[in-house]
Image: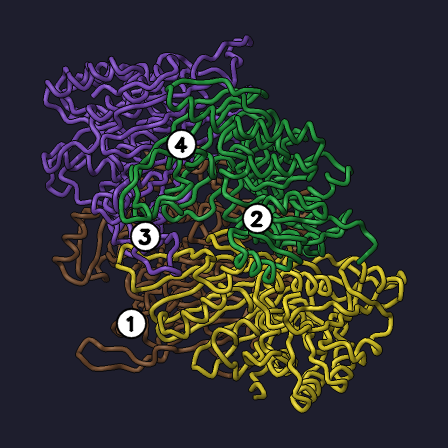
Chain colours: A green, B yellow, C brown, D purple
Amino acid sequence: MSGKPPLRIGLIGTGFMGKAHVFGFAMAEKVFDLPYAIVLRTVADVTEEAAARAAADLGFARSTSDWRTLVEDPEIDVVDITAPNALHREMALAAIAAGKHVYCEKPLAPSAADARAMAEAAAAAGVVTQVGFNYLCNPMLALARDLIASGELGEIRGYRGLHAEDYMADADGVFTFRHDTAGGGALADIGSHALATAEFLLGPITQVMGDCVTMIGERPDERGGRRAVEVDDVGRAFLRFASGAQGSIEANWIATGRKMQHDFEVYGSRGTLHFSQERFNELHLYTTADPPGRRGFRRIEAAPEHPPYGRFCVAPGHQLGFNDLKAIEVAGYLRAISGETAEPFGFTAGLRIQNLVETIHRSSSEGRWLAVPA
Amino acid sequence: MSGKPPLRIGLIGTGFMGKAHVFGFAMAEKVFDLPYAIVLRTVADVTEEAAARAAADLGFARSTSDWRTLVEDPEIDVVDITAPNALHREMALAAIAAGKHVYCEKPLAPSAADARAMAEAAAAAGVVTQVGFNYLCNPMLALARDLIASGELGEIRGYRGLHAEDYMADADGVFTFRHDTAGGGALADIGSHALATAEFLLGPITQVMGDCVTMIGERPDERGGRRAVEVDDVGRAFLRFASGAQGSIEANWIATGRKMQHDFEVYGSRGTLHFSQERFNELHLYTTADPPGRRGFRRIEAAPEHPPYGRFCVAPGHQLGFNDLKAIEVAGYLRAISGETAEPFGFTAGLRIQNLVETIHRSSSEGRWLAVPA
Amino acid sequence: MSGKPPLRIGLIGTGFMGKAHVFGFAMAEKVFDLPYAIVLRTVADVTEEAAARAAADLGFARSTSDWRTLVEDPEIDVVDITAPNALHREMALAAIAAGKHVYCEKPLAPSAADARAMAEAAAAAGVVTQVGFNYLCNPMLALARDLIASGELGEIRGYRGLHAEDYMADADGVFTFRHDTAGGGALADIGSHALATAEFLLGPITQVMGDCVTMIGERPDERGGRRAVEVDDVGRAFLRFASGAQGSIEANWIATGRKMQHDFEVYGSRGTLHFSQERFNELHLYTTADPPGRRGFRRIEAAPEHPPYGRFCVAPGHQLGFNDLKAIEVAGYLRAISGETAEPFGFTAGLRIQNLVETIHRSSSEGRWLAVPA
Amino acid sequence: MSGKPPLRIGLIGTGFMGKAHVFGFAMAEKVFDLPYAIVLRTVADVTEEAAARAAADLGFARSTSDWRTLVEDPEIDVVDITAPNALHREMALAAIAAGKHVYCEKPLAPSAADARAMAEAAAAAGVVTQVGFNYLCNPMLALARDLIASGELGEIRGYRGLHAEDYMADADGVFTFRHDTAGGGALADIGSHALATAEFLLGPITQVMGDCVTMIGERPDERGGRRAVEVDDVGRAFLRFASGAQGSIEANWIATGRKMQHDFEVYGSRGTLHFSQERFNELHLYTTADPPGRRGFRRIEAAPEHPPYGRFCVAPGHQLGFNDLKAIEVAGYLRAISGETAEPFGFTAGLRIQNLVETIHRSSSEGRWLAVPA
């Protein structure tokens, strides 16, 4: 349809994020004027049956239980990886070797070394990559970044970021791959979002002092036993930015009652921003440009003035949903593939986040400040 | 794909709501296990060029500038009407005459008489209809209705509904079809939402006392002149429900600063609900079942416990967007077409809303309470 | 102390409001530079014992069980009436006859006729009066009035006021004087606040359409029986203001979960105000003077820029309490007694509220709009 | 009056806090049934004129410019110190030496050594002391502590505290005693509140890792020059509690737009508390005891169920103000003097806070975790 060149997707993994990617593709195609016609070519899952069912449910033409055949299929242009973290490296390197563009869910890899190998391979091959930090695709975050960059807030002095959820708050919850020291823990899993947002808004973090704590020391395993947990339930860091600003982040997956609290506060000399993912269609702005006695935090609601909100809805205040952020991510990725724009958040950016996570972990272990590798 | 029978859509109108329907179709197909495979067959717009462009943008196979050919096309199963209000009757009756199912944006028609003709024709023909009151598709509204129906709030005594926006607050805004007495005004345009929600939650309204006010008495027309406005900028009503409850609603399209404030408060003898569309992924519940000193309005965030939220996202608190509500509406409609369920909000329900709007208008003019026709 | 002339207070009644007045006197004397030294001369209660205990607790020099001796005491300058509503007229007229200034809790009297007699007597005697509508003393309401009067909001078009509490939500709550048709009901008791605020902000209300509803038809009396309730649990009105604005108010004392929800929203052509007594140290302002894409409701926190906040605290955001509003009321009253200012909210203003209440009641009974007596 | 024994107050300092103490005395006497009759005997200020004016304004019988005569006056029972921080030690030791009870505004002293000397002297003399951490007197904090202590939240795992204001955000603000390394800085000035609340709720902090940052490196002095600032504008710490819980606090006095944001979040295994001083008559409680699908943060409003709220107001939701918290502090202090209760927050507790502040400062300088002296 539409005379656009096709872009053929091979999706690996059909869980929460696999589905979210498919929703993103579907919505992006309707909402945006994309440079390609998206073709859902093949989906891979762990068994043939699961893959076939996913193909039917999600609208892929083919299915497979062998991700390698997908990766090597000449009729696939983009390999989309939503498999567990520990598999990202192998899959991505194979896809890159086959000349595919690679779209990979976050975090990019269990270790910075893995991430570096992936980023270097992608750069060498000249393929276009994307890591799924879709909270950054929120029009309200673009507004926040504009407000900072424009100088409307004056000199940016401070930052406080938070990502709190409670999906690991139950001490009887079973040990999973997320509890494995190879890439697991709250800091890697959700602190990565907090770090990505911090750098998205204020630029590079140069020094960190970490504090990573395990509060639930063991969990039931799947065979009726107990297994020691060594990853952090709470990961914090003090931060120094290259810009001269300073601040902190906290990642917490045992924050009982919090479901999606990805918050930040940015303090400038002439204004402040407050944001909460709990109400992510709003941004709160305080500015000293308002007259005395009339100042206050202003609740700005997402509207067509905040692109690309208007693609979804011509009327203000109607609100985007979580999956809409994924559609924005997809659209940005396709524009990068077409050469229209640079990679919005590619493997190099993903490596950057892994470096931050590892440096914070190491700082916490060593009990001292560390410089973040460039 | 998928072996499901096709359901072929013919869409009339490609504005705000036309697009929202297409987004709803796209998302519904991915998110839900629908009884049909949706086929976007034909789109109609006012010119051939506009229609062709819409077909390309939105993914329809064909386009036309003649809605009658669309309506009569034997390869179309559902006629989806998002054209201006004044055209709904003619289009819907033609579609029903051609044996099509009809999906019609709200309000159903400019007058209750029109709506009645449409509802009767649909009933006689046995086609399945849907009117686009998509705010009712919010999982938080389903939760509200459950809380009321289950008796958790005790005897329901009072209701206060509001739908406030500011898209007509600018007195220099041009006179449009929405300012025409044939079906225009705040009460018909957005008060219809407030009335639909009131009855969705508390059941039939039996008596009303209306207060409809024009505050901006004339507006510029498109030829440089001024034109008198006779429709209401604010429409209010006192309400009596068949259940014994009482309350009020207000519709206001000159509510400067309000973008989408579709709010309600339901007072029961043992609990109260508060909701605002400004944060529509939340429902606030107060219950006297909580111990003294520990009571308070509880902010419930949308989660998989509130179907069909979990179809969109397996994790709580991630939030649905406006277009997702349309996807839920589409899914409900397709299930009704397949016979799986009854019409969620068909033409009979749409007629009901028109009756309420007209009775409130008449009550306002006559300055007295009126019974609502059954 | 301090060389100021004394102002000797005689207080009748020592319940919730009696105590609040004493707190107000104590705080006002410390916080403000008052024209008088307040002397708590005599307190009257129903028995000698209760009065003596109140004198000891609250710091009055003398006590009595006979309010008439208090009223006629030449060593008393101000008679402060916090006895039940039904006694206000007799007490106030006696006090006025004795040449006293009279401070009377709201509502002024059970009927407009009583209130008129009181207002006329006070005017004839030239004494200074005050009715206790202390919510009007909030610095945030002064700010709201300034914003309206200054034209910053443009033409004021609409108003919505609410006063909701739940102290009568329990159907097993005993029948009290507040349930008596002589002056009782939600509209008289708390709707009077909503009406006072509406006129404080927008000026005179000229026409009303009332809707007063009894939802709990009978209540236990104190002797084990049941007694029919005829007063309104919910009282609403549509409003027309002399200014050309229009709006509504609702009073509701069966609003389960609401403790002190005295709210309003004022819609202007260029801005809107939102206020809730639930957070009464804040006023929310939306203005179209903000640039597009940066607009939103701004949460202004009470601060020294909002007099007389700075008398209580030199730092912003520290917040006033309910009793502080009473201290502001006391200070305003004393300035009026000294001749420095006019009566802030005297018996004439109190009569005005009773007229509104009675007209709304009558309108509700007759089912039609009524003009409010000037 | 009232037959109670007198308690004669000598107040040193008449600024923000001096006035707040007087307001607290006045309100406490009316609101509570105190063991003493408070007598405002003498006020000391820097000049005779200022002191005489303060005596007249605030209602003291006498005045002096020599605090030593006040301290030694045999007709004074309590010396109340609201002079600048650097003077606290000398004044308090003199007062203790004269056998007076001492009420001292926070922070107790510029250094932990000073605070220790004061605490030891008070203990040796057997006088009763109070340090003015009045935010701890909020009924909502008592509720929070009860919820934690009762086990309703399960095992307490995490804490995040914040005290943010913006009174030093203006880089052109003049250098004051608060910028002096002898006791100044955000951590000492307001971080002390955050630390007091943290220990009030969760018990002793045993280890800290500090991060204290100066963002505004120099400020104008009062003679037209510039002066280097060495104290922290932002002070943070990671925390370990003796209970096994962990967390963090931040103090920030350059938080543009924040006026009084004393917030905390307490995470337990079965529930969470959230509180903000910006709305300090509310406490937000999440509990997993609520049924799935009905859970959410519950906004509990201050009410008579939360003592001593009911002393101020018999009706819920009417709200206490900042000065009311001071009245509660005064009442607690008088009960301790009378022997009815132990010291609520005496010099030993104040020393504890100074120890925490100094340890955090030192930890920040040394870039490593430190144990807090017991």
Residue depicted at x 64% and y 81%: B128
Q: Do the residues at discs 4 and 2 belong to one chain?
A: no
C62 to the left or right of B3 = left
Q: Is residue C170 above or below residue A68?
A: below
Q: Residues within 10 Å of mark 3 (few under 14, many from 20)?
A: many
The residue mark sitting in front, 4 or 3, is 3
Check disc 1 and give the amino acid type.
Phe
List the residue tagged with mark 4: D163
Check disc 4 and give the amino acid type.
His
List the residue tagged with mark 1: C177
User: SS class of the residue under badge 1?
Assistant: helix
Residue D287 is tagged as: 3
D262 to the left or right of C71 = right
The residue mark sitting in front, 2 or 1, is 2
The residue mark sitting in front, 2 or 3, is 2
Check disc 3 and give the amino acid type.
Thr
Determine the chain carrying the residue at label 4. D
Quadrant in the picture for residue B85: bottom right
Q: Do the residues at discs 2 and 1 belong to one chain?
A: no
Residue C35 is tagged as: none
Instruction: Measure the C-alpha gap from mark 4 to mark 3.
Output: 25 Å
Residue B156 picture location, percent across and down: 40, 74
| Proximity of marks 4 and 3: CB atoms separated by less than 8 Å | no
Q: Is residue A99 above or below residue A223?
A: above
Instruction: Measure the C-alpha gap from mark 2 to mark 1.
Output: 80 Å
